[in-house]
Amino acid sequence: MPVSQQQLAAFADTHAWRIPFDTSPRHLAGPGDGLRVTHGLAAAGWRRTSDPLNPEIVLTSPGQRHSLHFDPQSATSAWWRLRAGHTGSEPGWYAEFGQLVPAELLAAVTDALVSQPPAEQSDPFRTLTSANWPTDTAHTARSPDAMCLVERRFIDGHSTRLWHIEVNEPGHGIPRGPRLWHAVFSSRTPVHLIDAFVAALADPAPLQRGMYERTAHHSVVQEPSPLTPQQIVAAHTRRLDAIRAQARAARRQQQTPTAAQAPATSPAARPTARR
């Protein structure tokens, strides 16, 4: 079911009582509102396929290939799991995200998943370099505060790679302190999805968090936001409208026969009658 007016009203009511604060850097902003993720997928036609009484939520794409699992009772540190099954022409892939991953970063991935991929191949490290994140090697980059590490890891020699993003407490004399959150993208994950996550992660614009809302670390910087709760809700609604329009356009494109599928018979193709 698409996002209902009642669900949008509940989202608006929740945010109406929150005094928004500009919160940065993004990797320390905390989880925020997971409805940014689930509402976006619902607008694209994804449906809940899990038991409504189960605290675990499973959303499945219209074509049944993709699914998103949210499990607040997970025995591991991964609360969100995004999966794609393999097809005859495309491999399967998997991504997972920890509890304190900002919802806006995960929403950037799911928004990119339900929209048309870019024409040009993206490069997450080029995105980080443009955002002035120092690169340690050709395969690692760190946030300016050194608490977030983006790493491209190679397994099985050099044939298979996965992307690993991790935020840690400052080391206090050791290289890295306790982990705050992580995200992992398997080797077959489309690169433009990883780039969408990285671009949202490195964006210097603050995220909005309510007063007393949970953040990932005490060193996060918060200042009163110039945005009102009503503006935040309006931006959420516009995003859902845009996703819904993209989904409708994609369905129309799939239903329109291509030139190869069109009937070959036409007036120009008919044989000329003999006189």
Image: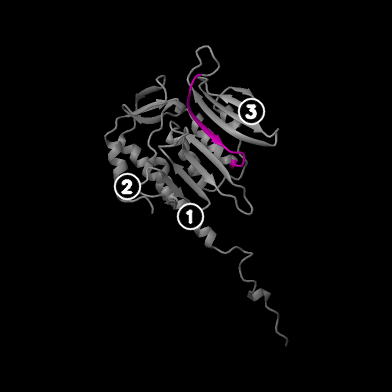
Residue located at (34% from left, 40% from top): 233
208 sits left or right of 18 in the view: right
Q: Nearer the viewer, residue 109 or 120?
A: 109
Local packing at callout 3 (Cα closer than 10 Å; few below 14, some 14-19, many 20+) is: few
Residue 203 position in % (x across, y down): 49, 30
Q: Work out which quarter of the rendered image holds the N terminus and state it.
A: bottom left
Q: Coloring scheme of the render? A: one colour
Q: Is residue 28 above or below residue 242?
A: above
Residue at the bottom extreme? Answer: 275
Label drawn at residue 139:
3
Q: Nearer the viewer, residue 199 or 173?
A: 173
* Mark 1: amino acid: Pro
What is the span of residues highlighted in magenta in the rendered image?
A: 177-190
Q: Work out which quarter of the rendered image holds the C terminus and state it.
A: bottom right
Do labels 3 and 1 touch, CB within 8 Å?
no
Label drawn at residue 62:
1
- Dot 1 falls on a residue whose secondary structure is loop
- Dot 3 falls on a residue whose secondary structure is loop
